[in-house]
């Protein structure tokens, strides 16, 4: 079924219900208006040359019409291509060139840039702007009000392309993940089921694409006052006002957003009385954030679903379960508990390799390996990137298993425990070190904001190091602080061999969620610091 049918059904069942609201000024569309206006946009796009199957690059800032344009493309049977503009200019242009879009719908600034760097946009045949930019670029809103308010939705099968979503490239090159209408529908159903979402809930998405799912469930979605490309810079004052003014029940996005909001509410003694669920994804969530919201929510809980652009969600767990059942093991370096598989998803732990494999060799409970998943939300490929697809996909008995690139283990109760990214492990002659396991020990120091396990290389081989960011941003390694670090490392067998500590003022993080630590960059930085020390002596 075309995912656009979900909006049509909701518009008929709840025509006057608000669909999308702009928090900044309170403007909104009812579901009836959403359906009619997206039909008008679909008719206008067809007139301008958009056809079924057309890969359509979409660069539109969060606004009332973002979701309408996206659903209009679904209705046509076109394939929206979504690339995170925060990934950096080089990666962005490389991604555009790789996916070879047929059409571009964007704000005017992108069209001006296209004219400056035309070699990356040679595949584009249809150019449409949300502002008047002249030339051969069509203005979307010209004659839009004269377009018909009905539209025949293009019929699709479950394997037909629905969208191409690019990964952020945080631990590799950005890759275009192929979504089908079957996967979008499956994801919507799974998310609706695990969070008990319905048309009576109101959503504030810190990650704009999440609104596509909640709108398809009949929820009202409120566009927050924030720049989604810079979640760590959000203004908690504005977001709290958005939540209170709109009686938000469901908030989702990067932990970087909700930690700022939670701390602000705690300091100002503000209770978020309407919020039932705080959903945080994109990186492991520290226990203190779950603790923080225990003092902020009146009748709600925190949740941390686990997944990736290639398959979401895989598992999920509540903050209350983490704090009541799993926290002691997490503090002891046993990994981060990320819950049990969601309905329909299978999780296995397999051998850790850095090359393509053709079968799933399963590890038993308690054994650390690479996480592999299979189920209705697992995508089958990256767009025209067969080498990258072969590295992460395993095809067994007609089923597709996705290698997450993450390390973990399954316990006897079926819970999945996360140990960090595969590329962040440090393997020496004697043992393997895992980022989450090592860092959890040092992160308990009251003066440490966060740490990063790094790989160092010398003439004697590979050995682990630790880079530290303090709350006070100090880069002065005092004798007292160093002694405390040594005491911590001696307390566990998997940290005792760490002999090199570095202080870094502010860690580099990923562009999408602003919270994943760039350990590869920090490894290079620490190696350079080692060389400076050697040269100085």
Image: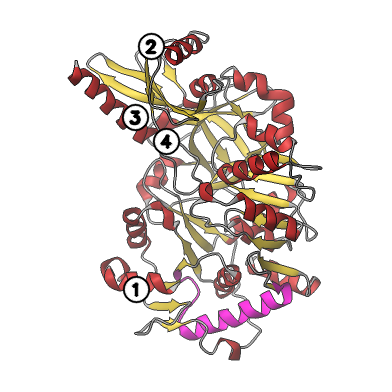
Check disc 1 and report the residue beneath it: 112
Q: Look at discs 2 and 4 and give the one toward the viewer.
A: 4
Mark 3 vs 2, N-terminal side: 2
Mark 1 vs 2, N-terminal side: 1
Q: Nearer the viewer, residue 448 or 80?
A: 448
Distance of label 1 from label 2 (alpha carbons): 56 Å
Mark 3 vs 4, N-terminal side: 4
Query: Does residue 254 lie above or below 441 as drawn?
Result: below
Q: How is the image coloured?
A: secondary structure
Check disc 3 and report the residue beneath it: 523
Q: Which residues are magenta?
A: 29-56
The quarter of the picture where the N terminus appears is bottom right
Q: Look at discs 3 and 4 and give the one toward the viewer.
A: 4
Q: In the picture provided, is 101 more to the left or to the right than 207?
A: left
* Residue 361 on image: x %, y %: 50, 28
The answer to whether residue 469 shows anywhere in this view is yes
**Residue 430's disc number:** 2
In terms of image quadrants, where is residue 245? Answer: bottom right
Residue 41 among those drawn in magenta: yes
């Amino acid at each position: 079924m075309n995912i656009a049918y979900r909006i049509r059904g909701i518009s008929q069942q709840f025509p006057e219900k608000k669909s999308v609201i702009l928090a900044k000024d309170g403007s909104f569309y009812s579901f009836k208006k959403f359906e009619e206006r997206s039909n008008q946009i679909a008719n206008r796009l067809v007139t301008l040359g958009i056809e079924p199957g057309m890969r359509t690059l979409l660069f539109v800032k969060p606004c009332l019409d973002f979701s309408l344009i996206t659903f209009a493309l679904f209705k046509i049977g076109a394939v929206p291509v979504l690339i995170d503009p925060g990934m950096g200019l080089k990666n962005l242009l490389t991604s555009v060139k790789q996916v070879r879009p047929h059409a571009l719908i964007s704000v005017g600034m992108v069209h001006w840039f296209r004219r400056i760097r035309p070699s990356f946009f040679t595949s584009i045949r249809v150019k449409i702007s949300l502002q008047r930019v002249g030339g051969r670029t069509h203005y979307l809103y010209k004659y839009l009000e004269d377009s018909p308010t009905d539209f025949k939705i293009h019929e699709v099968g479950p394997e037909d392309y629905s969208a191409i979503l690019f990964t952020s490239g945080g631990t590799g090159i950005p890759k275009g993940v192929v979504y089908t209408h079957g996967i979008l529908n499956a994801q919507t159903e799974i998310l609706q089921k695990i969070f008990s979402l319905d048309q009576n809930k109101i959503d504030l998405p810190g990650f704009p694409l999440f609104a596509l799912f909640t709108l398809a469930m009949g929820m009202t979605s409120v566009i927050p006052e924030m720049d989604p490309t810079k979640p760590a810079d959000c203004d908690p004052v504005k977001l709290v006002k958005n939540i209170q003014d709109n009686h938000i029940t469901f908030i989702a996005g990067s932990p970087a957003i909700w930690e700022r909001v939670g701390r602000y509410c705690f300091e100002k003694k503000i209770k978020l009385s309407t919020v039932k669920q705080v959903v945080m994804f994109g990186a492991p969530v520290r226990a203190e954030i779950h603790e923080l919201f225990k003092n902020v929510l009146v009748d709600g809980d925190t949740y941390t679903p686990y997944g990736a652009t290639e398959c979401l969600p895989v598992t999920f767990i509540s903050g209350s379960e983490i704090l009541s059942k799993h926290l002691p093991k997490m503090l002891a370096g046993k990994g981060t508990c990320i819950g049990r598989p969601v309905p329909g998803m299978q999780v296995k732990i397999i051998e850790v390799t850095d090359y393509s494999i053709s079968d799933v060799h399963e590890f038993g409970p308690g054994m650390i390996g690479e996480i592999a998943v299979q189920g209705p939300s697992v995508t089958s490929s990256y767009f025209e990137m067969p080498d990258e697809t072969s590295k992460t996909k395993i095809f067994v008995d007609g089923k597709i298993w996705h290698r997450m690139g993450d390390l973990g283990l399954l316990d006897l109760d079926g819970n999945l425990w996360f140990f960090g990214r595969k590329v962040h492990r440090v393997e020496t002659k004697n043992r393997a070190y895992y980022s989450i396991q090592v860092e959890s020990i040092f992160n308990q120091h009251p003066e440490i904001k966060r740490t990063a396990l790094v790989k160092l290389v010398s003439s004697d081989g590979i050995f682990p190091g630790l880079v530290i960011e303090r709350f006070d941003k100090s880069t002065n390694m005092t004798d007292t602080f160093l002694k405390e670090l040594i005491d911590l490392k001696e307390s566990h067998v998997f940290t005792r061999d760490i002999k090199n500590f570095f202080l870094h003022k502010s860690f580099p993080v990923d562009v999408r969620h602003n919270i994943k630590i760039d350990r590869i960059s920090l490894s290079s930085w620490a190696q350079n610091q080692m060389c400076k020390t050697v040269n100085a002596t």
